Structures are given as structure tokens and as C-alpha cells.
Image (cartoon, rainbow, N blue to C red):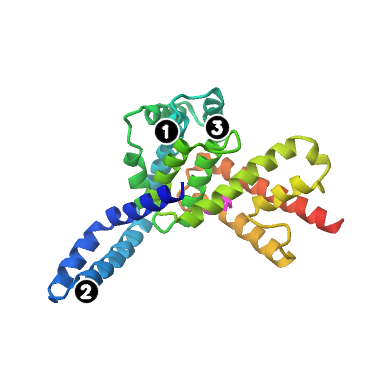
């Protein structure tokens, strides 16, 4: 998975900023020295990134919302079919997401169409990921939320397969997310999946259970030996990153606000479990 993500990530950046690279290299070529071409390409790359980021922040929010919505369900469809067949659990997850979003008939039909499209063997999800990546350039919070939704789908059974990992690599590619960002998010999602299972079982009555408590720390991206200051800092950062109003203000579709609310509730629950355990 690591080499796949890095390869996609590197290739995506070259592709997205090829105009700046080419123009910069041509300008550098005028100097007559080989290093001038490399330096010019680097400068052109950085300028192109800045221009895309600035232009992306000025795009109308409805365009961001529509791209996010369509890409969400299209990629969910691709993930569901990644291993060759779609399971009942994967279909239920997509239906559950739609139900939690309380979609009207029109949006539900749109979500289903996107899901079905993504399931097609010959469908290239880069068609939806490339424009989404452009729109979310510099929008760290929304990129994070998109990846978390897809990881939750891939981890229905607690882990994602190699083929699902390939799809997630493409997501990282076009959202411009590094290997470190992906790994940290994937680790938190694994812990969140286990934490949810524990909350539904006996652990909700035994908050000091060592294994389950470790999952609560994992939800916050922490180790059990962290100090109180680090605990509070991680908690506040995650709560801020997943604040529903902030996400909607940055382009999250209004219908997905419930998903963000549930995310903050999960973070809050994990934090409360840790605080209670530390008092004992």
C-alpha cells in the first residue's frame, strides 16, 4: 500500500501542475544551463500550486458540494466492487449513509446512480476525483472528511483489502494526501471501528478495560502513555476539524452534516472514556 500511495501521490502532483512545470522549465532553459531547467520547473510548480489553491478557494460553494456528493457515492461504489463482487454489508453501508443524510427522493436517486456508476468495471473514478482534488486544494478539513468516509466503508470488517487499498491510493493521489496523512487517518479509523464495537458490547459498562481503553486513545490518534496536555490538544484539534458548521462552511454538503455530528460524538465519547479511566 505504501509504494502504491507514494507512486500515485507523486504522479498526481506532476499531472495537476504540469502547466507550471513546463512553463518554468522553458523559462529556465533560456539560461542555457541544465540546472536552470530544474530550477525553473520547481519555481513553476510552486507558482502553479499557489494559483490553483487561490482559484479553488474562490469557487462557488455549491460546486464544491456537488463534487463532494457525487465523488462520495461514486467512490463508495468503486470500493464495494473492488474485490470483484459487492457484499450485502457494503450495500447496507451505502444505504445507511443515505439514510443518515436524510436525502430527499431526488438526491437519493442521484446517490444511487453515482454508486451504480462507480461499480462499473470500466469506470475510471479519476473522472470525479480529479475535479474534487482541484476544488479541495488547500481544504484540509474537507479532504480529511472525504477520506474518513471512504475508509469507514472499506473497513466494514475492520480492515481493507489490497484491491480496496488501490482505490484508496487513487483517493490520496487526487486529494494530494501524503502517506503519513493516510496512515494516521487509517489508524484512527481502525480504532474507531473497534471502539464502536466495544461501545455496543460489554465495554460500555466497563470503561477501564485495557484493550478497549486503548481503542479510545486510538480514536484520538494517541498512545495510552500520553500526558494530559497532549490528550486535550488532540481532542480539541479533532473536534475543531470535524465541527459540522465549519465543514459545511468549507463546502461539505448540508445533507452530510449529520455524518459530521456523529463523528464529533464519537470523538467526545472516546475522550470521556479516557478521562473517566484517568480519574480511577
Q: Is residue 147 positioned above or below 92 on the image?
A: below
Q: Tell me which label, 2 or 3, sits earlier in the chain.
A: 2
Give the number of marks: 3
Q: Specify the quadrant of the image occupied by residue 70.
A: top left
Find disc 2 in the rendering and name its residue: 35
Category of crowding for the residue at label 3, using alpha-carbon neighbours closer than 10 angstroms: few (below 14), some (14–19), many (at least 20): some
Camera-side residue: 14 or 260? 14
Q: Is residue 21 positioned above or below 195 on the image?
A: below
Find disc 1 in the rendering and name its residue: 78
* Mark 1 vs mark 3, CA separation in Å: 23 Å
What residue is rendered at 79% in x and 40% in y?
Answer: 203
Residue sticking out furthest to the right: 280
Magenta segment, prevailing SS (helix, strand or loop): helix
Whole-percent x, y for residue 262 in the image: 63, 43
Of the two numbered discs 2 and 3 in the rendering, the one whose residue sits closer to the viewer: 2
> Which element carries disc 3, helix, strand or loop?
loop
Residue stretch in magenta: 242-246
Q: Is residue 56 left or right of residue 102?
A: left
Tag on residue 102?
A: 3
Tag on residue 244?
A: none
Amino acid at each position: 500500500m505504501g509504494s502504491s500511495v507514494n507512486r500515485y501521490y507523486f504522479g498526481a502532483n506532476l499531472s495537476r501542475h504540469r502547466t507550471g512545470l513546463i512553463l518554468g522549465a522553458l523559462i529556465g532553459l533560456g539560461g542555457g544551463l541544465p540546472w536552470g531547467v530544474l530550477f525553473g520547473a520547481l519555481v513553476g510548480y510552486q507558482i502553479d500550486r499557489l494559483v490553483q489553491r487561490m482559484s479553488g478557494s474562490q469557487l462557488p460553494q455549491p460546486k464544491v458540494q456537488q463534487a463532494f456528493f457525487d465523488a462520495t457515492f461514486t467512490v463508495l461504489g468503486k470500493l464495494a466492487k473492488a474485490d470483484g463482487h459487492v457484499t450485502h454489508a457494503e450495500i447496507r453501508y451505502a444505504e445507511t449513509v443515505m439514510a443518515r443524510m436524510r436525502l430527499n427522493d431526488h438526491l437519493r436517486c442521484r446517490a444511487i446512480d453515482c454508486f451504480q456508476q462507480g461499480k462499473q468495471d470500466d469506470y475510471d473514478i479519476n473522472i470525479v476525483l480529479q475535479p474534487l482534488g482541484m476544488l479541495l486544494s488547500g481544504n484540509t478539513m474537507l479532504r480529511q472528511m472525504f477520506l474518513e468516509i471512504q475508509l469507514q466503508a472499506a473497513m466494514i470488517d475492520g480492515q481493507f483489502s489490497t484491491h480496496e487499498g488501490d482505490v484508496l491510493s487513487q483517493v490520496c493521489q487526487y486529494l494530494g494526501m501524503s502517506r503519513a496523512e493516510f496512515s494516521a487517518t487509517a489508524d484512527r479509523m481502525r480504532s474507531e471501528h473497534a471502539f464502536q464495537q466495544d461501545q455496543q458490547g460489554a465495554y460500555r459498562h466497563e470503561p477501564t478495560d485495557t484493550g478497549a481503553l486503548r481503542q479510545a486513545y486510538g480514536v484520538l490518534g494517541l498512545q495510552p502513555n500520553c500526558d494530559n496536555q497532549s490528550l486535550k490538544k488532540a481532542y480539541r484539534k479533532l473536534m475543531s476539524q470535524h465541527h459540522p458548521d465549519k465543514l459545511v462552511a468549507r463546502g461539505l454538503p448540508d445533507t452530510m452534516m449529520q455524518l459530521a455530528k456523529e463523528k464529533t460524538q464519537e470523538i467526545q465519547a472516546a475522550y470521556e472514556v479516557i478521562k473517566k479511566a484517568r480519574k480511577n
